[in-house]
Image: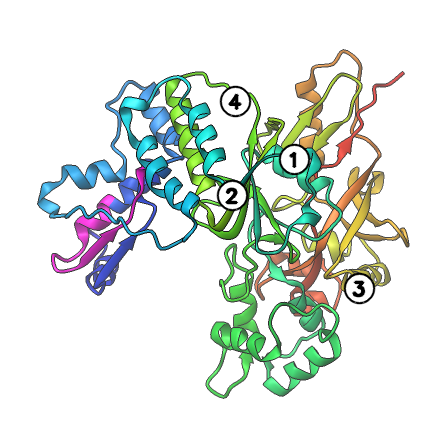
């Protein structure tokens, strides 16, 4: 250890807890291994792991590269800890199941887990056998996704699909409030922040002033699951001053970070309602009731792939606390662009489903930017978003040649523009066209319908952000902008030139 500041920080740690260790591989394992070596000899270390839930090892890029280079395979973190006898780790097996009292779920946690770990059972057909066992132990099974609706479920329910495409398709055809748990859709800041502070330009905020803003702008309109007292407590923990006020500059800096403080971050992307997500994105989470949608006709290229998919299935089945329902769905997979955006092409002449709503698709400039809007139009757009901050809204996209063919976001009712998508989407559409390798010339469509917004969220720009100078007032001074929370997988019709 050559960095004295880091060494000093590590010397003050009394105990370290490492969770989900079965999925720590590659560079992360290197980092934690180095950390363990530098901790004091009297520092406690507790490592939690369940190898039946190891579902990320085969996809680790660093391991794949080292294998391709012919170098010695690297050990995951668990293997390293076991191999280093000098570290003195003691292995303890936790047998008591506290998550559930359901007899079927308890058998999944115990008996099925042992089957998944038993290497003598790692053979062709393991996934199908495990899936059938999950169906037998579930509280209900045999349901078809085509006969199910998100409206049938409550906010305590978690609907799990295997692939992103399945989640996006389920979300696209649901017109009721729900939440997404999906990679590429990080936690968002609640809409009430922008509604309260979009025109607040003072350096400090007193509690009385905040309560007045809440009463006039939030109460009975776009109120979250908590009230003004708890909201104020969140603000105080993030940017409170000794005199009992909020330092708005500090608040903006902290909320404008790539990962804002958890006190105000919404864990899922969307409105209050059932959670729809992938098994991978729901790792480490649980819910009272879980609906596990199993794809039909799963096929595998190798026994290693089948074993890992079996563990994925086990992870999905163990997210439930009270009840597990197993349903069936068609296996759908989307292609992924270099940006991470998903798209799914159907038969020739049919539309291509394209993912919209990823990080970077909507920015502050695309909502109240001077180059994109007049001051009056920016105000009108923000006023409309305030009205729909907590409801599902359907938008229409229209390509604007004056914005380098970026798509403007138009409301379905009034028809005026509330925002403009970034060039990220336009670039990705051209990549999709290039990948189609069609003989005819094509261009992205001039408009796209059925783009659904799950209420609104807040974008916060720190006081030193360069984008502030591109915005209209008052947002250039306040740094708080209201944004539609778009999560859509709409059809794009690509037509050739005649």
Q: Secondary structure at mark 1?
A: helix
Point out the frontmost of discs 3 and 4. 4
Marked residue nearer the N-terminal end (1 or 2): 2
User: Which labelled disc corresponds to residue 145?
Assistant: 1
User: Which labelled disc corresponds to residue 387?
Assistant: 3
User: Which labelled disc corresponds to residue 139?
Assistant: 2
Point out the frontmost of discs 4 and 2. 2
Q: Secondary structure at mark 4?
A: loop
State the residue lying farthest toward the top: 439
Q: CA distance from mark 1 to mark 3?
A: 33 Å
Q: Is residue 37 magenta?
A: yes
Marked residue nearer the N-terminal end (1 or 3): 1
Q: Secondary structure at mark 2?
A: loop
- In the rendered structure, are the residues bearing label 1 and label 2 in contact, judged by CB atoms less than 8 Å apart? no
Q: How many marks?
A: 4
327, above or below 215, in the image:
above
Quarter assignment of residue 246: bottom right
298, above or below 269, in the image:
above
Could you say where residue 489 lies in the image, as x and y percent from the top left? 70, 37
Marked residue nearer the N-terminal end (3 or 4): 4
Quarter assignment of residue 205: bottom right
User: Which labelled disc corresponds to residue 268?
Assistant: none
Quarter of the figure with the C terminus: top right
Residue beneath label 4, please?
Answer: 298
Could you say where residue 448 lies in the image, as x and y percent from the top left? 81, 37
Q: Which residues are magenta?
A: 33-51
Residue at position x 38%, y 46% from top?
Answer: 106
Could you say where residue 461 lies in the image, as x and y percent from the top left? 61, 61
């Amino acid at each position: 250890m050559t960095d004295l500041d880091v060494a000093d920080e590590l010397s003050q740690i009394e105990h370290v807890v490492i969770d989900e260790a079965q999925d720590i591989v590659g560079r992360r394992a290197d980092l934690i291994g180095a950390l363990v070596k530098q901790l004091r000899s009297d520092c406690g270390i507790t490592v939690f792991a369940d190898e039946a839930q190891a579902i990320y090892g085969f996809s680790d890029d660093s391991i794949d590269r080292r294998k391709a280079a012919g170098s010695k395979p690297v050990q995951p973190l668990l293997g390293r800890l076991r191999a280093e006898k000098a570290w003195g780790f003691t292995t303890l097996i936790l047998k008591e199941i506290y998550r559930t009292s359901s007899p079927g779920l308890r058998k999944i946690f115990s008996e099925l887990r042992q089957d998944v770990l038993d290497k003598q059972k790692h053979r062709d057909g393991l996934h199908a056998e495990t899936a059938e066992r999950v169906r037998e132990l579930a509280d209900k099974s045999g349901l078809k996704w085509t006969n199910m609706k998100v409206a049938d479920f409550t906010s305590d329910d978690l609907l799990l699909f295997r692939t992103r495409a399945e989640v996006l398709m389920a979300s696209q055809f649901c017109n009721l409030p729900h939440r997404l748990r999906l990679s590429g859709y990080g936690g968002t800041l609640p809409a009430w922040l922008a509604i309260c502070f979009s025109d607040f330009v003072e350096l400090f905020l007193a509690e009385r002033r905040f309560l007045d803003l809440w009463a006039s702008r939030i109460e009975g309109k776009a109120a979250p699951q908590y009230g003004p007292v708890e909201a104020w407590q969140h603000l105080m923990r993030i940017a409170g001053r000794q005199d009992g006020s909020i330092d708005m500059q500090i608040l903006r800096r902290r909320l404008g970070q790539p990962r804002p403080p958890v006190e105000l971050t919404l864990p899922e992307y969307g409105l209050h309602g059932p959670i729809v997500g992938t098994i991978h994105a729901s790792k480490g989470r649980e819910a009272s009731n879980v609906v596990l949608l199993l794809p039909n006709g799963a096929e595998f290229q190798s026994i290693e792939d089948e074993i890992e998919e079996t563990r994925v299935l086990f992870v999905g089945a163990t997210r439930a606390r009270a009840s597990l329902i197993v349903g069936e769905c068609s296996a759908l997979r989307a292609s992924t662009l270099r940006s991470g955006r998903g798209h799914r092409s159907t038969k020739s002449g049919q539309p291509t489903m394209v993912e919209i709503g990823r990080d970077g698709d909507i920015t502050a400039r695309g909502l109240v930017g001077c180059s994109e809007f007049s001051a009056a139009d920016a105000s009108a757009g923000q006023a409309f978003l305030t009205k729909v901050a907590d409801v599902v809204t359907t938008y229409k996209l229209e390509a604007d040649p004056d914005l380098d063919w970026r798509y403007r976001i138009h409301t379905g009712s009034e028809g005026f523009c509330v925002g403009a998508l970034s060039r990220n989407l336009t670039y990705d559409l051209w990549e999709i066209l290039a990948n189609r390798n069609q003989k005819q010339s094509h261009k992205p469509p001039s408009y796209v319908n059925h783009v659904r917004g799950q209420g609104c969220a807040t974008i916060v720009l720190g006081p030193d952000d360069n984008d502030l100078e591109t915005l209209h007032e008052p947002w250039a001074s306040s740094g708080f902008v209201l944004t539609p929370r778009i999560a859509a997988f709409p059809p794009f019709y690509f037509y050739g030139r005649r």
